[in-house]
Image (cartoon, grey):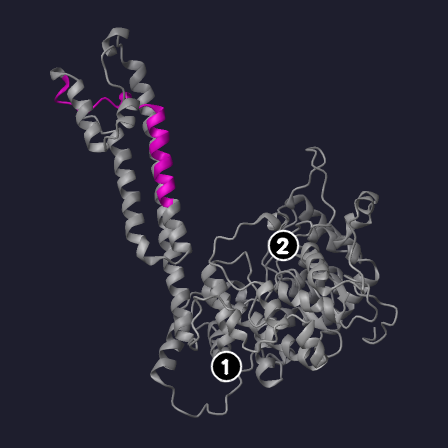
Amino acid sequence: MSKRGRNSELCADCASPDPHWASVNRAVLICDQCCSVHRSLGRHSSQIRHLVHTSWPPTQLQMVQTLYNNGSNSIWEHTLQESASLASGRRKTGPQDKLHPNKAEFIRAKYQMLAFIHRMPCRDEDSFTAKDLSKQLHSSVRTGNLETCLRLLSLGAQANFFHPEKGTTPLHVAAKSGQVSQVELLSVYGADPGAPDANGNTPIQYARQAGHMELADRLVEIQYELTDRLAFYLCGRRPDHKNGQHFIIPQLVDSGQELTEVAKAAKRKLQSLSNHLFEELAMDVYDEVDRRETDAVWLTTQSHSTLMNEAVLVPFLPVNPEYSSTRNQGRQKLARFNAHEFGTLIIDILSDAMRRQQGNTSPSPKDEPVVKRASCRHASDSQDTYQHDYDSVASDEDTDLEVHSGKKDRTKSLDSDVSDTPVTMQEFLEVKNALSASEAKIQELIKANVTLNEELRIMQKKVSKVDKQCNVSDGDYDNTVYDSELWHSGLDGKSRLQVIRCREGPENQEMEPNPTLSTTEDVIRQTEQITKNIQELLKAAQDHQQDSFVSCAERVHMAVRDMVTLYPKVREA
């Protein structure tokens, strides 16, 4: 299908004629004005490409065109077409509406909050789980009905769903059936071409076994999409996968010079990252490459007056609410790398990706790339009520104000905690290593808490058994201070233990306190205190407040110690 054969097409968001941009994961065509808002949403919400000035895989462009021509926009505007919405005055924006706030608010509601998509009925007998939707997707991809699959994905179906009975993913089914457009749609939503089925076969092998050789070649390209995009950004060339060349390592002009000690240290830190952290860093750099390339196309296609008066600049990567505050801030700092620094970082990533792929580190399953392709995770239904737990960062509105005021200093809209000095790759990697260590400590504490809860359940069973064996008369406890009163008295664990020992009488001084004296209320209260303290430690780790780690950990330790004093071991006779 010709890229320019679009005379009758309209913008999906405001109905302006002759749209020049496309949102790949939403499968809609949009005009220049609406595209400026899409770019501020981030790739996790909308993946933007120019229909002419961006290099497209032909089958991916065909997938978007086919979906748009068959009504993909009705998926994202389903409720706007209902009579109730029309009666309430809810409508989509038109070509004459202002970009701010009208079009911008509508686009954010449509794609970030998914405010207008069709929701499943709430009745239990009619409700569908993500697993049910994913099973439907698994069955639908064998056909050419792209709209059904996009609708299922918009409702939460998982592109990498592994069918427990059939032992395959939707991508295996689409590859075997030769459904090229279905493969493109699934890959945009994160389907992994290297994922094995129950017998260890990948979708690439399925396509080759079914005789779909061109589709198999395309799946290999999708598998190496991330590293291919990074190499193309630097040198304008892609590897020849058909001939077994899967990596291109570009060289900088000054590559013959000796590396500085700082550069050597940064390279060592990069090589020491786990595969998971290395993959995250590579995906963040991929997103930054996409932002810079889209900016370059945007600047070449817009007039000066449009850039200064209407368009939204995107000076750094927008916040992804699925990521931690540390990762979001690190992603934004990538915009501060100059061309030479950013190129050096990309080359180091490509070199280390090839090293890891060739087995110089822990091998990946099925010899699939350590650095996976950058995928889209569409917004969840609850995204509109999501409460951010990370530090504040520059918002889209801040960027809008910067454009309207004519400011050219792109760094002024960054948060105040972002330094004006250049960020080195070593500093960037140190942050990721520190975050990884903090998360590991938190996981250990969570496991310890689970173990303690299990031990408490066992103790409670033993206490119940001892209680049944005891034959105590009703009058024996008439003048006893109960444990619940000790809790409200404000005594610590050691003091409560002394009170319990005193009240037992001389005949029991050779034994530890009777465990039946601790009430269920005490156990629940102390368990809640332990959980609260662990949550405080987790929050401190997520906010990267290392100064609070020790005090939070001490509170966890004290709460656990108080719990132990509730059930001292009974000495053996």
Q: CA distance from mark 1 to mark 2?
A: 32 Å
Q: Which mark is residue 379?
A: 2
Q: Which mark is residue 338?
A: 1
Most foreground residue, 416 or 338: 416
On the picture, is 359 further left or further right than 113?
left
Determine the secondary structure under disc 2: loop
Q: Which residues are magenta?
A: 508-534
On the picture, is 332 further left or further right than 488?
right
Q: Nearer the viewer, mark 1 or mark 2?
A: 1
x%, y% of residue 570?
21, 26
Q: Residue at x 67, y 44 (%)?
A: 132
In this rendering, the answer to whether 21 lies above or below 567 is below
Q: Disc 1 residue type?
A: Asn
Quadrant, the N terminus: bottom right
Mark 2: few/some/many CA within 10 Å (<14, 14-19, 20+)? many
Most foreground residue, 463 or 207: 463
Determine the secondary structure under disc 1: loop
